[in-house]
Amino acid sequence: MREPVSAAEDVRHHPDLPPDLGFTTEEDDLDHDRRRRHTWLWMGGLFAALLVSLPLTVGLGPVSIAPGSVAGIVGSHLFGSPQVITWTPAEDSIVWLLRVPRVLLGVAVGAGLAVAGVGLQALTRNLLAEPYLLGVTSGASTLAAASILFGFGAGVGSGSLVVSAFVGALLAGVAVFLLARVGGQMTSTRLVLAGVSVGYVLQALTSFLIFASDNPDAGRSVLFWILGSLTQATGSSALSTGVVVLAALILLLLVARSLDALAIGDTTAQTLGISPTRLRAGCMVVIALCVGALVAASGGIGFVGLIIPHVARMCVGTAHRRLLPVAAMLGAIFLTWADVLARLAMAPQELPLGIVTALAGAPLLFLLVRRLDPTR
């Protein structure tokens, strides 16, 4: 007669379970080593691509500046002026005051949106989950529109727009959290429905604010900001946003194995001693804070949090301790080059960044749909 099999043994042999949840065999160890080498190769290649992209994207724009001049300008500000200066004062101002903060903010925002997308897709077990799903982007847009159109939060000073957007994002995240938590439980289905509901209500409220305003210039400004832009980047905003994104990445990496289990199902997570409700609540707070900071700095930028996690899975698989850092670097590279297209496509005018990411992301999404398992 067959010996009884424990719940842990059932989980161990689950066909969809990543091999790094604490249950290892000799075969899994060998496969894990191969996966680790594969991941390090991807991370090294992406890091090198990001380093190459930084001076190139800083130099590209309506006024083109050679990478050598970009390196010289940045080096002069960091380490002191060289004896021979080969660039003009105008180029110095363009690179150091405008484009370096803009590119660094693009790196932070792209990485943050990708990390948030990975986390949300694990929490909801929904391949279409992204930061817009939380309604956080819509909340930030609503209070930002109120700030631009009607002076909401003017008492804060020159940072009223950023503060309003951040507060709106946090309030929207809290509303989604409260709606999704019923009877002390928070399921993936409730989380999706609550996020969609809050998002639609806030989008309608934003549209009403634009309609109610009698200032057409302010209305156009709101629309441009809602579609996303890095034009308001400063050194301080790039630094603060980068710190928030790094903190969110570290916190999600600490629960990466729990996210692996949760992505398979609540039953699997409970079998491993993980509370799905507590894990969703904690990750929801982290992601809401991260997305709030991103939207406050750059407006609403779509498709990055949707597309990049899928591309990262194709590169390194589904285990979150590999997936999160790779997705962060892919998102950073993608958004910095999308911003270059936004600057150059209709120069000297600039396209909203959300339009570029949508035009680039939609074909990628179509290709990913074509590659999906037909049984899913």
Image (cartoon, helix red, strand yellow):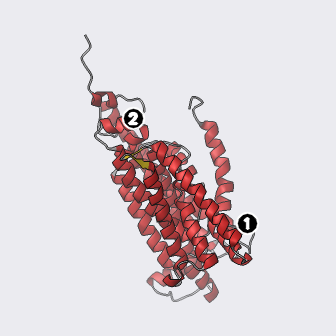
Badge nearest the viewer, 1 or 2:
2
- Relative height, residue 22 to residue 75 (above, below): above
Which residue position is annotated with label 2? Answer: 17
How many numbered discs sit on the rendered protein?
2
Q: Amino acid at mark 2?
A: Leu
Badge 2 marks a residue whose secondary structure is: loop
Whether residue 100 is visible here, answered yes or no, is yes
Which residue is found at the position 47% from the left and 58% from the top? 175
Residue that badge 1 annotates: 345
Q: Please identify the quadrant where the N terminus is shown.
A: top left
Residue at image point 61% right, 37% down:
371
Q: Nearer the viewer, residue 203 or 161?
A: 203
Q: Residue 95 lies in what quarter of the image?
A: bottom right
Dot 1: what SS?
A: loop
Front residue (pair 243, 139): 139
Q: On the picture, is 259 further left or further right than 306?
A: left
Q: Position of residue 180 (x, y in %)?
A: 45, 49
- Left-right relation of 125 to 352: left
Measure the C-alpha gap from mark 1 to mark 2. Answer: 44 Å
On-image quarter of the C terminus: top right
**Farthest residue, direction top:** 1
Residue plotted at (52% across, 73% down): 164
Front residue (pair 108, 262): 262
